[in-house]
Amino acid sequence: MGIEEKRPRKSRSKRWYHPYLAWIGVVLVAVAVAGLLRLFVIQTFYVPSQSMMPTLLPGDRILVLKIGYTISEGSIVVFKTPPGYRPSDCGGTVESDLVKRVIGLPGDTIWSKGNTVYVNGRPLPEPYLPKGLPLGEPVAREKIPKGEYFMMGDNRPISCDSRVWGLVPRRDIVGRVVLVIWRHGRPDFDVL
């Protein structure tokens, strides 16, 4: 008979924790990646009010792209609450972030007449609004300076927006809304 080699035995104490350490490492890396994505790339937000109806409903969860997006007329964006915002002006509470539609870009001249909003002398095409929706508060004639944006909610008669608290600087824009991910208490993927 031959000589058998004795293999060293792994100690039981080392065997049980090695797989757990690997899983803990995987979970920590996943949490770090998710945190970085949320901080710099994409984030979800909750729509608290009726100001963006019918496009966004109260209770909707939206996905906001924070890098690599462009802002154009009609884009829906999330931005920090403007310094001129007072809850008493809008019948609400202070919110840390707001969601509205971009109506005027830097360099545009904007105003309203009747229920029509004009940008650079042309009526603003607004296929996202219901026909005959009243404007509510008028838009004063204003040339938008470089680096600033004029925002309005789609529910014009009740929306507290740039007509009340003024223009929004580019630095305060968090990102562009790209997707509704939750509506009526269930998942709903509606690209905006």
Image (cartoon, rainbow, N blue to C red):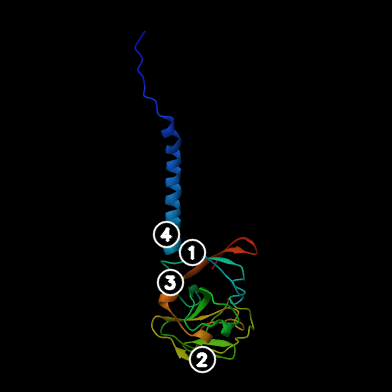
Amino acid type of the residue that numbered disc 2 sits on in the rendered structure: Ala
Q: Pointer 4: what residue?
A: 36
The CA span between labels 2 and 3 is 26 Å
- Residue furthest to the top in view is 1
Measure the C-alpha gap from mark 3 to mark 4: 21 Å
Amino acid at circle 1:
Gln
- Write down the quadrant of residue 132 in the picture: bottom right
Q: Which mark is residue 43?
A: 1
Q: Which mark is residue 140?
A: 2
Give the residue number, with chain letter if any, for mark 3: 70
User: Along the polypeptide, which appears first: circle 4 or circle 2?
Assistant: 4
Residue 9 locus on image (x, y percent)? 39, 25
Foreground of the two, 191 or 21: 21
Q: Residues within 10 Å of mark 2 (few under 14, many from 20)?
A: few
**Residue at 62% across, 71% down:** 58
Q: Residues within 10 Å of mark 3 (few under 14, many from 20)?
A: few
